[in-house]
Image (cartoon, rainbow, N blue to C red):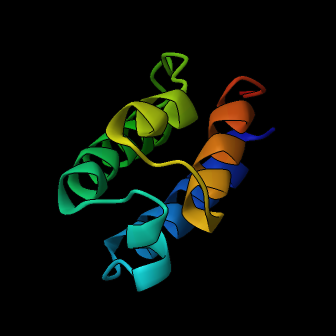
Amino acid sequence: MKREELIREVNELILEIESPLSQAELANGWTIKSQQATLALLKKIHEALQEKNPIPIYSIGRGLNHWGVVNGPLLEAACTLSNHLCEIES
């Protein structure tokens, strides 16, 4: 996956996660703390992508599971992004 595509994907996920958590996402295990932690991580990834720095391999889904997030579209999008980070091209 191209770096520009990843930047776009990260931006989209940041916008989604910055929105207030829905009742469905709260039921899936999201909390304000997990939301803030995920946003901080995504912003760190975004910065590294823009600066063309190496991206550490993150298992974002595993981290969210640790926070208690067990299901839902935000978790799926985060896991997809995590997979795409492993496929990065210059």
Q: Which residue lies furthest to the front in this view?
A: 27
Quarter of the figure that contains the N terminus? top right
Image position, residue 76 (x, y; %): 67, 54
Horizontal arrangement in the rendering, residue 19 relative to residue 4 (left or right): left
Quarter of the figure that contains the C terminus? top right
Which quadrant holds residue 15?
Answer: bottom left
Question: Which is more toward the observer, 82 or 30?
Answer: 30
Image position, residue 60 (x, y; %): 51, 34
Name the residue rendered at 44%, 69% in the picture: 27
Image position, residue 31 (x, y; %): 26, 60
Question: Which is more toward the observer, 68 or 56?
Answer: 68
Image position, residue 81 (x, y; %): 65, 44
Horizontal arrangement in the rendering, residue 57 relative to residue 51 (left or right): right
Name the residue rendered at 63%, 35% in the picture: 82
The answer, for residue 71, to whether it is visible in the render is yes
Label total for image: 0
- In the depicted structure, whether residue 24 falls above or below residue 77: below
Name the residue rendered at 65%, 42% in the picture: 79
Name the residue rendered at 33%, 72% in the picture: 18
The answer, for residue 4, to whether it is visible in the render is no
- In the depicted structure, whether residue 3 falls above or below residue 24: above
Horizontal arrangement in the rendering, residue 84 relative to residue 40 (left or right): right
- In the depicted structure, whether residue 13 falls above or below residue 39: below
